[in-house]
């Protein structure tokens, strides 16, 4: 999926101030979606692969996207920006978090880059704050383009749609990274792992269950996965309930978005349901 651009025929420039824009930025790619807030209908999806470990190349890609895509410069009702930085994020329990010590918390487990900015987001479903690193020049670009945009770590979307009150494991499958999250009353855990194939994925998932002595009642998947993938069926051999993250039933989708091949944009769509 090099580039994807889908715009519903009902898109109307005269109604732009009733539209909400959600953006997701990761090293895998740059994506955005648009919601018609009056009709509660998702009417646009754009994605551009930018898979790279080089921040300079990633920034160059972002500049070219903003130069080419006019939809990003429109005056939306609300704009939210989500950073997906699984290997540059650490969780800090609410009970001990202090925003004045954000950098210190981050450096307890991570080495901050010279050209980075440390941000934080409340992750209520994990009773924690996500403290994370973003490239400063990328952040400056996004703040310049969206001065009223609200910045978040994408973990704020992790618990959306998850059944409350039961121990569960949420697994996000990215292009080369696996993000494993647990949400229950006893263990709130998040970590990322680089994988080469489904055997690596299964190793890390089962290893996390064993090492944390977990008994998850449900496994929820999203990202580059669908019900035809081998990892989905292999997990069903170990766990009784394996599901894909569900769309918000109160939001409608353009027919163009009804048959996407996997769940990589589900969090972007569900972001419209979070204030």
Image (cartoon, helix red, strand yellow):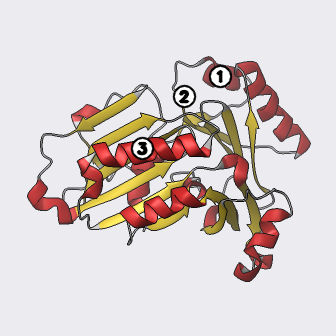
Task: Give the residue pinned by disc 1.
Answer: 231
Q: In which quarter of the view is residue 20 placed?
A: bottom left
Residue 74 lies left or right of residue 9; in this view the side is right
Query: Residue 144: where, in percent of width, then height?
Result: 40, 66
The first of marks 3 and 2 along the sequence is 3
Q: Residue at x 38, y 30 (%)?
A: 3
- Of circles 3 and 2, the one toward us is 3
- Label 1 near label 3: C-beta < 8 Å? no
Label 2 to label 1, Cα distance in Å? Answer: 8 Å
Vertical order, 12 against 258 (above or below)? below
Residue 111 lies left or right of residue 40; in this view the side is right
- Of circles 3 and 1, the one toward us is 3
Question: In the rendering, which numbered label is found on residue 31?
Answer: 3
On the question of residue 214 being in view, the answer is yes
Question: In the rendering, which numbered label is found on residue 225?
Answer: 2
Query: Residue 151: where, in percent of width, then height?
Result: 50, 65
- Label 1 near label 2: C-beta < 8 Å? yes
Q: In which quarter of the view is residue 94 placed?
A: bottom right
Quarter of the image with the N terminus is top left
Label 3 to label 2, Cα distance in Å? Answer: 17 Å
């Amino acid at each position: 999926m090099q580039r994807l651009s889908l715009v519903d025929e009902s898109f109307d420039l005269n109604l732009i101030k009733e539209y909400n824009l959600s953006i997701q930025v990761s090293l895998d790619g740059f994506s955005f979606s648009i919601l018609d807030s009056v009709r509660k209908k998702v009417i646009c999806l754009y994605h551009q692969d930018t898979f790279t470990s080089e921040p300079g190349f990633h920034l160059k890609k972002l500049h070219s996207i903003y130069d080419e895509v006019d939809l990003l410069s429109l005056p939306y009702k609300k704009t939210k920006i989500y950073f997906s930085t699984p290997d540059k994020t650490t969780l800090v329990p609410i009970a001990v978090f202090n925003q004045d010590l954000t950098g210190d918390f981050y450096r307890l487990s991570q080495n901050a880059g010279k050209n980075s900015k440390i941000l934080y987001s409340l992750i209520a479903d994990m009773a924690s704050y996500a403290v994370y690193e973003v490239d400063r020049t990328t952040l400056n670009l996004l703040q310049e383009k969206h001065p009223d945009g609200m910045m978040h770590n994408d973990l704020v979307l992790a618990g959306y749609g998850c059944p409350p009150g039961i121990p569960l494991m949420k697994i996000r499958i990215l292009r080369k990274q696996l993000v494993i999250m647990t949400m229950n009353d006893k263990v709130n855990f998040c970590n990322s792992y680089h994988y080469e194939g489904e055997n690596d994925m299964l190793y890390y998932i089962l290893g996390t269950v064993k090492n944390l002595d977990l008994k998850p009642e449900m496994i929820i998947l999203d990202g580059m996965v669908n019900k035809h993938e081998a990892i989905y069926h292999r997990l069903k051999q170990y766990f009784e309930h394996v599901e894909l993250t569900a769309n918000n039933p109160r939001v409608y989708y353009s027919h163009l978005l009804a048959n996407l091949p996997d769940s990589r944009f589900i969090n972007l769509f569900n972001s419209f349901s979070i204030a």
